[in-house]
Every structure is written in C-alpha cells, then in structure tokens.
Image: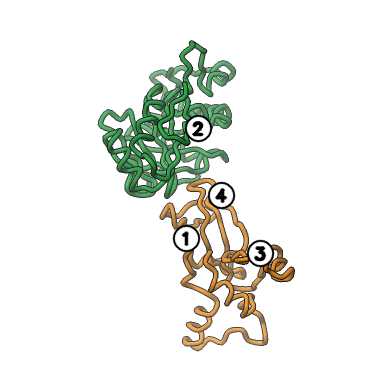
Amino acid sequence: MSNSVAQNVRTFETHPEATVPAESPLAWSYHHSGRPSASAKSRVVLRERAMLGHLILRGGAIVLDEAVRQVLGFGLPGRPNGLTRDASGERSIQWLSPDEWLVIVPGGEEFALEGKLRKALGEAHYAIVDASGGQTLIELEGEMARELLMKSTPYDVHPDAFPVGKGVTTVFAKATVILRRPDEQRWELVLRRSFADYLYRWILDAGAEYAIGVEA
Amino acid sequence: MFHIHCPYCEELREEEEFHPKGQAHIARPADPEACSDEAWGDYLFFRDNPRGIHHELWVHAIGCRKFFNITRNTVTYEILETYKMGEQPAITAESLASTEKLAGVQVAGGGQQTVGASDSAVKDSRGAKV
C-alpha cells in the first residue's frame, strides 16, 4: 500500500484492493430526498459525476506547470479563475488561488497520477493532497441552468462575466462551492461532502419550477 | 452588498466572500526576548482607531483564501484601494491630505483628528515589512 516516491512522504491508495462498497456523498440524499426523473418538461437536468479523483496541488506555478505538462499533457491555467482541460474533457485543472490548483481526473487515476507528479516534481517545494473523498462534482445542464444559479449565488453568471473556461470558488446558497463552466452547455459544481446534502436539496427546491430532473 | 476587488483573484467579488481581520502592517518585534513589556503589549493589544484613512487586513475567506490589505475611509466606508501582502499602500492619510492641500481644501480643521494614527505609529507601519 505504501509507496515511497520521495523519502519524506508517505502516500497511500485511498481505494483499497478489497471490495469495500463506496458511496457518493449524495447517496443518502438520493435515498432521503429522492431523484425526480428528467422528462421532456425538464428545463434543468442535474447529473452527479461521483467518485472522480480530486487532487489539490500547491506550490509554485512554474514548477507545477512543468510537471503537469509532462504527466498530463496540458498545463495549468495561466490566469486567475482559469480552467484548463485535456482534449477528451475528462481531466481538468482549475486555478483556486495563486499557489493552489484543483486537478480532477476520472476515478481511480488519482493515485497513479499523484505518484507520477511526485516523481516529476522531485525535490521541489510542493504539496499534493488527495481530496477525492471530501467532495463530489455535479453538473447542471439545460436552458434554465443559469436561472437556477442566479437564484443561488451572488456571483455574476452572465456569459460576458463567466465565459467558458472559467471557474471560481464562491458563495452558493450561503455555503461554499467551486463553480465552473467547462463548455457552453454545462455548469459544474464541486461540492464539499458536508454541504452536499444541503446543496442537493437546495438545488431541487430551486429547480422545482423548471421541473428539474436528476439523471443517474 | 458591495463589491471588493481581490488583488489575487484580480476581480471584484461580493462582500459576503470576505472577512475583515483588523489593522494591517503590524510588525512583530524582531527580538521578542529583548522587547520591553510596553512594546510587546502595544504589539499584542493596541490598535489604531482612526477617523478617516485606515489600512486594514482582510481575507478572501470564500474564494482564494488569501490575506490582503484594504485602504478604507472609516467615515465614508469608501474603499480606496486593495493591495497584496508585502506591498505598501499607494494612498495614505498624508498623500490624501497633500493632494487636498494642493486643491485648496483645508483638512484637519479645528484640531479634529483626521489621520488617526500617531506620527510614530505611521512611521512604524512604513518601516514594517509585513
């Protein structure tokens, strides 16, 4: 289990080899609050992309950029509040603060990625934290998705202020979320585990007038 | 509801995302062991409460979570500038007073305190490498 890439760092695989059932932070909410099914009337659709690999990278932009280019094939966003993705759109890096980035990769890749990054970074001054268990990602799609966001967050989500390829950490229904716009159709919200149930219920309530549907 | 410019996010954000953290540019005494009780007490407990220009430490708590400085007018609540940690303010009570003097406006009339910070405190904050 332990993997000593660097002498002074112990890493461990958060997905054990034994088959232990894993549940998304929203599992209980689906059970308790239900999942309204999406229909032709739904003008907003919510989709959870559970069990992705979330890594927090901290360190200097130049050294981290070099390492992620080498390992992932694309670089860090060059500007504050930026979001970069690979060609498939499956892997992304988002600016969180001047020395902090969020990397999201398909579930199961994060441990190998962490090892490769540690190897590429060598003796550089940096930190990598696997936050996969602490947060989940949901997508909002549909013509009224922006209306729903406008009811929930004080951040300006007009396309002029929030173009594709932007991501911010902001207030959403008095809680914190990472809000990002990977493409024209979709909005992504990265929710903290502890806020997930509250925000899920908030979004269902806010989306009720648009006949929100939840897709598995 | 008003907007504050975060110098790290490089854009205006909602006030809700920020927290004030008190007076800015307070330098920790370089050698606390050799520091007098009075100087240490001043450092720990005593803060300026000016009427007018005040330099404050704020944190972008729901956002980039970085600390930065705000120059604020405590009378009008106007935020004159925000700047990063380690930088010095472009606008101070003195710089404003001198531009107003040039414009023919009399400031600090009737012995009213508009600057707030004592001269020595201002000098200290100038030298501080916070």
Q: Are marks 1 and 4 in contact (CB under 8 Å)?
A: no
The answer for how far apart the CA atoms under marks 3 and 4 are is: 37 Å
N-term mark: 1 or 4: 4
The residue at 33%/41% (across/down) is A165
Q: Amino acid at mark 1?
A: Lys
Give the residue at mark 3. Answer: B32
At label 2, the amino acid type is Leu
Label 4, on which residue? B16
- Chain A, chosen colour in render: green
Image coords of residue A3 (percent x, y): 43, 26
Q: Position of residue B107 (x, y in %)?
A: 58, 84
Above or below A209: residue B86: below
Residue at image mark 2: A191
Which is more toward the observer, B39 or A188? Answer: B39
Residue B36 position by quadrant:
bottom right
Residue extending farthest to the top is: A19
User: Which structural element holds mark 3?
Assistant: helix
Depth check: give the residue in front, A181 or B46: B46
Q: Which chain is orange?
A: B
